[in-house]
Amino acid sequence: MSALQTVTVNYVRGAVPERRAGHAGLTARLALDAQTKADAYRVRYDSYLGGGFIDPRDDQMFADADDRLPNARSVVVYKHGKPVASVRVCVLNQEKGWHDIPARRVFPEAILRILEGLPAGSTLSELNRLVRHPDYANDFELVFVLFRFATYLMAQDTPWCSKILSCVRRNHTSFYKRLHFEYVDGPRRYAGVKFETNLMAGDQARYQDMLADMPIIDTIAQGEAAYAGFLQGEMVSVF
């Protein structure tokens, strides 16, 4: 069992951790301004470079064309003011004119099958670019914090979300299964990086199971006041 799987077991079935000293200084911000976006791109770069998944770049940033689209938004988590983790949510919604997400380019046949099985107007939300700075590679709680804010974005911005997708590195597949994601297709190499991923998906019904099993991820239970201003790009405390 991997270290991430072990930590996951400790969080399931309502085992919400008490606030510890290590939580102090954890904040998060939606990347709406240039500086926060740069923080997201730098954390991605450091994470991927540290893992050997990209080649060095002069600007020490990792961004792609999706970052410039209106259906893609990133969250950055900070520890004592230092950017340490980030995740991006990309939304496919035909009615809004949002026709593309990275997973659709990597797994076009599988995404088409998913869309054909959903009612017209359904939405797909993809979690991607989930990274931690190499200095915090063993801080597994950051993964749950990233999920917390990503699912908050989906709940607030896309309440009609029909499927949650993620292109998951092969060694992380078991972790996502614990979050009630199911294997769909793969492995295939993901865009811009040197690793293969499996396409995994969860639906609204299984999402409720995930919240029941891992309430640390449930942002709604924290109360709206705890995250007031987040969608406007304000810095908010994680715990």
Image: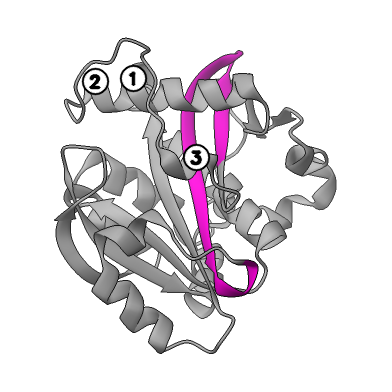
Between 96 and 29, which is closer to the camera in this rendering? 96
Q: Are marks 3 and 1 in contact (CB under 8 Å)?
A: no
Q: Secondary structure at mark 2?
A: helix
Q: Which residue is mark 2?
A: 50
Kind of residue at disc 2: Gly
Kind of residue at disc 3: Asp
Q: Secondary structure at mark 3?
A: helix
Give me the C-alpha separation between circle 3 and circle 1. 17 Å
Above or below 76: residue 162: below
Kind of residue at disc 1: Asp
Residue at the image point whose x is 27% and y is 63% from the top:
199
- The answer to which of marks 2 and 3 sits earlier in the sequence is 2
Q: Which residue is mark 3?
A: 67
Chain part drawn in magenta: 74-96
The disc at residue 46 is 1
Residue at the image point whose x is 43% and y is 58% from the top:
101
**Residue 9 makes an appearance in the image:** yes
